């Protein structure tokens, strides 16, 4: 039983980032020219809308979130909370690769402005929605489940990594999304979040970065 679940999780790790990368494949240069396209909006909007709809609809929450939660917790496994560190790997990689001499779409000043702005938006959205929505976590008594802050952080970094390096180095973009996906899966595996929290967090994380890139020309980035 446990082996089957782990196999499914590994399949998810391989497929989910590849799907997201494919969704963006026609707009990889948009991190440079800051144009808005449907391809950039479709994937994060779908993730955010789906997660929100599942969380807000009691029947769907019971059927989807409840069943996935039961499936991930069947064997009473020990927690493996690597996501507390992994969430910062994508955004850290943007700066590490730049420092190592790998050419990015933007220079240091713009990277700091874009990353800092996206990070602030990430914190505001995550904490604001948690405070307003007050969804109970999978364990009782804690009401700040929606959306997953760890997942938002991981995906905002993965999207910035894709925009800066994905055109020339598509493997880097896929690696970033693979790490971000693993963060979301671990949040469920460790009984910290529902699946809907993770879906919405992934979408919001991508949108945080996308919004900063779209606003960049107006903010003189």
Image (tube, rainbow, N blue to C red):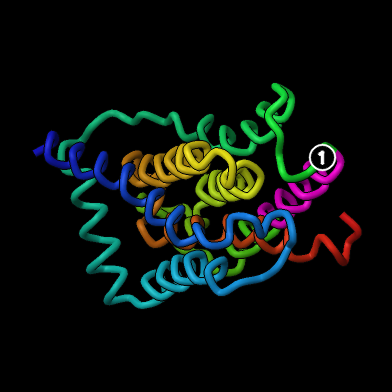
**Which percent across, then down, holds residue 25?**
49, 57
The region drawn magenta spans 109-123
Residue 107 visible in the shown view: yes
Image-quadrant location for residue 179: top left
Tell me the SS state at disc 1. loop
Residue 130 visible in the shown view: no
Q: Which residue sits at x=26%, y=68%? A: 62
User: Which of these two is toward me, 9 or 217?
Assistant: 217
**Which percent across, then down, holds residue 168?**
59, 41
**Which percent across, then down, holds residue 211?**
70, 64
Q: Residue furthest front?
A: 168
Q: Is residue 131 above or below residue 16?
A: below
Q: Residues within 10 Å of mark 1 (few under 14, many from 20)?
A: few
Q: Which residue sits at x=46%, y=42%? A: 174
User: In the rendered view, does 71 fall on the left or right side of 65?
Assistant: left
User: In the rendered view, does 163 fall on the left or right side of 187?
Assistant: right
Name the residue that disc number 1 marks: 107
Q: Residue furthest left?
A: 1
Q: Is residue 65 above or below residue 113?
A: below
User: Which of these two is toward me, 140 or 217?
Assistant: 217
**Magenta-span inclusion, residue 115:** yes
Image-quadrant location for residue 221: bottom right
Q: Which residue sits at x=52%, y=37%? A: 172
Report the predominant secondary structure element of the magenta stretch.
helix
Q: Residue furthest top?
A: 100
């Amino acid at each position: 039983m446990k082996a089957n679940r782990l196999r499914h999780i590994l399949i998810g790790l391989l497929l989910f980032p590849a799907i997201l990368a494919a969704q963006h494949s026609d707009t990889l240069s948009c991190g440079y020219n800051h144009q808005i396209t449907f391809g950039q909006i479709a994937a994060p909007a779908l993730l955010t809308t789906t997660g929100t709809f599942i969380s807000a609809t009691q029947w769907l929450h019971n059927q989807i979130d409840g069943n996935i939660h039961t499936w991930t917790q069947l064997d009473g496994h020990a927690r493996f909370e690597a996501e507390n560190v992994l969430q910062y790997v994508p955004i850290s990689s943007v700066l590490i690769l730049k420092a190592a001499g790998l050419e990015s779409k933007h220079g240091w000043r713009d990277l700091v402005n874009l990353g800092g702005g996206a990070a602030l938006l990430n914190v505001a959205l995550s904490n604001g929605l948690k405070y307003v929505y007050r969804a109970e976590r999978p364990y009782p008594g804690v009401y700040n489940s929606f959306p997953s802050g760890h997942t938002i952080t991981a995906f905002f970094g993965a999207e910035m990594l894709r925009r800066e390096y994905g055109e020339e180095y598509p493997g880097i973009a896929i690696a970033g999304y693979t790490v971000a996906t693993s963060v979301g899966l671990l949040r469920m595996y460790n009984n910290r979040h529902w699946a809907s929290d993770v879906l919405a967090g992934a979408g919001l994380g991508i949108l945080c970065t996308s919004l900063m890139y779209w606003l960049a020309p107006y903010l003189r980035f």
